[in-house]
Image: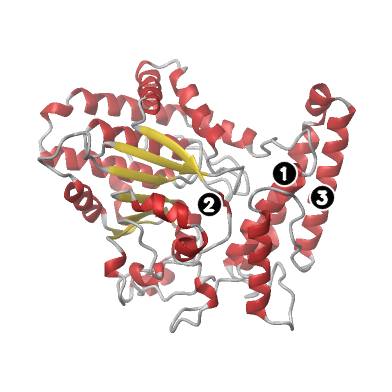
Amino acid sequence: MMAADRTVHGVPPSLSAKVVGSFAYLTVRDRLPTILTKVIDTIHRNKNKFFEEYGEEGIRAEKQTISLLSKMRNELQTDKPVLALTDDLQDTECWNQYLQRQQDLQGDQDSVSWFKSPWLYMECYMYRRVQEALWLNPPISDYDVFNEAKTQSYFESQQAMMTLCTYSEGVNKNMEELSKNQLLEHFNKLLQVSLWGNKCDMSISAGQDNSQKTSPLDSLNSLQPFILVNDSNMVWSALIAAQRPGQTEVTTGVRVDIVLDNSGFELFTDLVFADFLVSSRLAREVHFHGKCFPWFVSDVTANDFQWTIQQTMAANHKWMSKSGVQWKSHLKEGVWSYHDHPFWTQPHEFCDMEADAPDLYATLQGADLVLFKGDLNYRKLTGDREWAHTVGFNTALRGFGPAPVCSLRTLKANIQVGLQPGQGEKLSSQDPDWMTSGKYAVIQFSSSKLEQKD
């Protein structure tokens, strides 16, 4: 049973495209059809490649996939009822049950449709239908329609990546001599680099180039005022508190889980940060969580993760290739590991995870800290609901707390909790687009379920 099904006192409604003029409305009306059009164009542009690889069967698959996607685009633009999935992927039944639950919540008078239903659900559903269109048309079922954009983003951010690897090399070389304060300073810097890496999001730019051109380290000071909530000291304290002195190395050691967002430059910043955590012994192991299939244009899949490490190893830059070799060795030794789970590509709020994906919830309980990257994770953490800005982060999590949780997010959707009284109003008067421009950011922390009483 979804948390959303229960009558919970004081839980606001989901953000939805039914509010004309809202960011959700503009996303469903404009941005989603633009993304679908680009997907259709990409598949069409690659028809010769499909022909070379698969002959006439490749061309037939290309035509049928485009036909299904064009049909979906029309359903979206005319606010048609949402359809059950017809493929046989492992999560199909789960999606169709979710549709039924939404229908039950809505009652009989209205069908679940693109503009009338929760925005989070509809946006996730669109990407799942893209996957369905491909899956129903072998031999191009495994084709990543977003791969070109992701690859371009990586290569166009190379200069910034070299700068980061040079910095990282300097830190690693002197690691043994660093005082606790110096370690904290490097920690904060790399945490913030990972935070601002989240600006490079291609679903928000509808697939336009969004790479990092400048040095991410040089801009940290000037970006400081744009961090609206900064709980980085609490994140540091959680890591330090999790160190268990006096026990043998085999049975102890801190585990950090990073629930990834975008590939390209953002993933690169996450890898640099994870390397620092391990090299500084702040963590013994890092578990990365990505998506099972291409998602929200630029989200990380297993292929993107491995490809990024291979490309970094092959870079024509001493410290960058050295970083890549180091990362590969972390994976080989089991210090790093990559995981995916169908739940990350479903529309559920995270407060449903314990009931709907108990195995994943139990996995996260093994971590000492879980970092959630990016906007979509934030929307799922808070349920993508119309919370007042002053509502506490813990309250908005609605009981979700497998381990201490930190959200690193640049704001690209109109939801933000945990602000001081008056802070949201002041921002609205100074900058009406503050919640959706990616210009502002938060580092928000919740220590555990125990705090979530209010």
Q: Quadrant of residue 391?
A: bottom left
Q: Of label 2 and label 1, which has the lower sequence position?
A: 1
Give the residue type at disc 1. Val
Instruction: Give the residue at x 77% y 54%.
Output: 86
Nearer-the-camera pick, 376 or 2: 2
Q: Quadrant of the N terminus?
A: bottom right
Q: Earlier in the sequence, mark 3 or mark 1?
A: 1
State the separation of the CA atoms marked 2 and 1: 21 Å
Task: Report helix, strand or loop for mark 3.
Answer: helix
Instruction: Check contact, mark 3 vs mark 1: CB within 8 A.
Output: no
Q: Residues within 10 Å of mark 2 (few under 14, many from 20)?
A: many
Q: Which mark is residue 68?
A: 3
x and y percentages locating residue 143 in the rendered image: 70, 35
Instruction: Name the residue: 45% across, 23% down.
Output: 312
Relative to 11, 18 lies left or right: right
Q: Which residue is mark 2?
A: 344
* Residue 136 in sight from this viewpoint: yes
Q: For the residue labelled by badge 2, is the local secondary structure a helix, a strand or a loop?
A: helix
Rendering coords of residue 403 (x, y %): 32, 56
In percent of width and height, residue 119 lies at 61, 66
In x, y percent, where is residue 238?
A: 22, 52
**Residue 39 marker:** 1
Which residue sits at x=27%, y=41%? 189
